[in-house]
Image: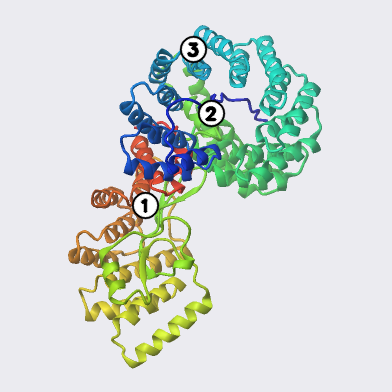
Amino acid sequence: MRKIGYTLAFCLVYLTGAAQWNTDHMLRSGRSALFLDDYVSAIENFNHIIRVKPYLSEPYFFRGLAKLNLDDFEGAILDFSEAVALDPNYLHAYAYRGVAYHHLKRYEEAIRDYNTAISINPTEAYVYANRAITESETGDHAAAERDYAKALIIDKKLLAAYLNRAIAREERGDRTGALADCNEAIELHAFSDDAYGLRGYLKFQDKQYPGAIEDYNRALKLNPLNKRVLMSRAIAWYEMLKFPEALADYTRVLEIDSTYSHAYYNRALLRAEIGEYNSAISDLNEVLKLNQDNILVYFNRGLLKLETGDRDGACDDFSESIALYPDFVNAYLARASVSDHGAATRDREKAAEIMERYRRMKEGDRNALVDTTENFRRLVDFNARTDRVKEVINGRLQDKNAIIELQDEFVVQYLDIDTLRKGRVQYFNKHLMAYNQEHNYQPAVTISNKRPLLPDEFLDTRIALLSARLRENKEDADALLLRGGFYLHRGEYTRAIDDFKAIADRQPDHLLARFNLANARVQMYDYIESIEARAPRVRFGEQQQQQRAVDYSLVIDDYERCLALDPAFVFATFNLANVRVKAGQIDQAILLYTRVIEQDKEIAEAYYNRGLLYIYKGQRSLAVADLGKAGELGLTDAYSVIKRHGNATGN
C-alpha cells in the first residue's frame, strides 16, 4: 500500500509591530479577513485601498499574503516586490517573498530575500526557520541546522522550527534527534495535533505500531478532521492486520474530503485484499475521476475485473495502462492472459523485447531507449501537477483532477436586482445604459455571464405579457428582445433565435439583438453537442484532433457584425474568443482575449479564459499570471485552478 509521509510546513506567524498600521477601515477589514482565512475578501479590500492610495506599501504586502495563501505565488511575488519598492526596509515583505520563491523552487532568490530580511532585523525567528527549510531543500543541511538553532534561541517555543527540524533530521536518518524535537514540541505545545501526528509517524517508521496508534489517537482528539493523521492511522491499522479499523479511517477521510484520491486508492487495495472486489473497483473508479492517467489504477482495476470474471473489461484496462506507458511489461503480460492466441503471443514477445532492452540499458547500452524513471513516476504520482490530460471540449479544459470550464459567454438578460448572485456579475456598457435610460429601467436589462434565479412562474407570466404585446404589434423590438431573453433563459433556443432574428432582420444595426442572436445559437449548439456526445477525447501529446461537427460560421458572422457596429463592444469579442476555443482555434482565441484585456483591463473572465488556454499550451507562467489577475479582480474560481497548477513545471 502507498504510505504517506509528512511534508514541510512553513512557519507563517502573525505579524505585530511590523509597521505603523493604517487606520483606514478597508485596511482593518482586509486584515480581519486575512485572520479569518477569507483571502478573497481580503484581496477585495486591499484592491480598494490600492486604487485610492497606491503609494502605501501595506496593502500590497497584505494582498501578497492573501495570494500566498491561495497558492498564487507569482502574484504574491509581484505584490511583495511592489511593497519593497515603496518601502525598501519592509522586512516582512522580503521574508514572505522568500516563501513564495521557495514554493516555486527558486531557492537562490528565496535565500537572498531571507538574507535581506535578516540584515534588516536579525531577531525574527520565523525568518531563520524558513531559511532553514530552503537550505534543506538545497542540500545544505549544516546551514539548516544552524538556522533552526538560531530560530529556537530567539523563540524557544517556535513550534514550526521543532517540527520542520524533526522532519529534516528524520530524512537524514537521525530518528533519535527527530523524536527529541517532537517530544520538545509536545512538551511546549501540548495541544498540537501536528506534533503528536509527526511523533506517531516516527514511531510507525520504527515499526512501533501501538505507540504510533496512541499518538495518532491523541492528535485526532485534538483535531478530528486531520486527514493526514487519519490516513497514517489507517496504514498503521493495516500493518497490525486490523482491517476494519483501517477501512473506517479511510472512509472517514473521504467523508471529510471526497476528492482525496489517496484514500480511495488505499481503501481499494485493502478491499481487494479482503475479497471485496466490486467495492474495490468502485473506489478505483473514483480515483480515475480525479486522476485519469494513473497507470497503476488501470492496471489494478484490470486485475480486479479478472477476479470478477470481466475479462473484456480487464483487457481494456491493461490496454489503457499500455497506452499511457508503452514500456509497462506487467501490463503486456496481464493482457496476454486474457487475449486470444495471436494477440497473446504478440504481447509476450513485446514484453520480452522490453525486458531485453532493460537488460541492455543496465549494461550501459545508450541505444536501448527504454522509457523509464521520471515518466513512470509522473504516471503513478497521484499529486503530480504536470500529469494531466488536456482537452478542449465545448469550451472545457480538463486536467487530471477536475473539469475546469471556461467562463461562459456574456448574454443580454433581464435585470432583477433581488436575484443577482452575490459578487460582481455585471459590467458597465454604454449600450445597456442607453437602453435602460430610454426605458426608465422598467424593465431593465444587464449583460452578464451569470444566470439569475428566475422562477418558472415568473418566466411564464412575463412571456405571456410580452406575447400579448406582440399580438398587438409584432414589430415591437423591445418586447421581442425581452421575450427572446426569457426563452433563452429557459433553454427554448429555437424560439429565442426566432425573436432575436425578427429584430435583426428589420433592424440590422440593433446591436443587442444581433448579440443575443449569436448567443442563442451558441447555447443551442452546446446543448445539441452535449446530447449527442460528439466531443472527442484529446490526449496530451497527440498530433491530431478530430474535427468539430459544429459549424459556427453563423455565430461568428453575428459577433463580427456586432463588432462592425461597435469595435469597442468587448463582450462580443469575448464571446467570439469562446467560440474560437470551441472550434479548436486556440491561438486565435488567445489573441481575442488579449484584445478584450487591452480594451478593458477589468474583465476578469478574459484573464481567466486566456489563463486556461495557456495551461493547455503548457505556458505555465503566463497561465498563473492571468489566473492571478482574474482572482485579484474577484473571480475566485481562478485560485482553485492556481492551486492545481501553481507549482507545475513549464515555461
Estimate how packed mark 3 is, as few (under 14), some (14 to 19) or many (20 or more) residues with alpha carbons within 10 Å: few
Front-most of residues 645 and 412: 412
Residue 566: image location, x then y, percent: 20, 63
Residue type at mark 3: give it.
Gly
Q: Is residue 567 left or right of residue 98?
A: left
Q: Are marks 3 and 1 in contact (CB under 8 Å)?
A: no
Residue 281: image location, x then y, percent: 67, 46
Q: CA distance from mark 2 to mark 3?
A: 29 Å
Residue at disc 3, secondary structure: loop
Q: Is residue 483 left or right of residue 194?
A: left
**Pointer 2 residue:** 14
**Pointer 3 residue:** 139
**Sequence-first disc among 2 and 3:** 2
Residue at disc 1, secondary structure: helix
Q: Are marks 1 and 2 in contact (CB under 8 Å)?
A: no
Residue 252: image location, x then y, percent: 72, 42
| Residue 605: numbered disc | 1
- For the point 28% across and 86% down, the residue is 475
- For the point 71% across and 43% down, the residue is 307
Q: Is residue 413 left or right of residue 160?
A: left
Residue type at mark 1: give it.
Glu
Name which quarter of the figure residue 577 lies in. Answer: bottom left
Residue at disc 2, secondary structure: loop
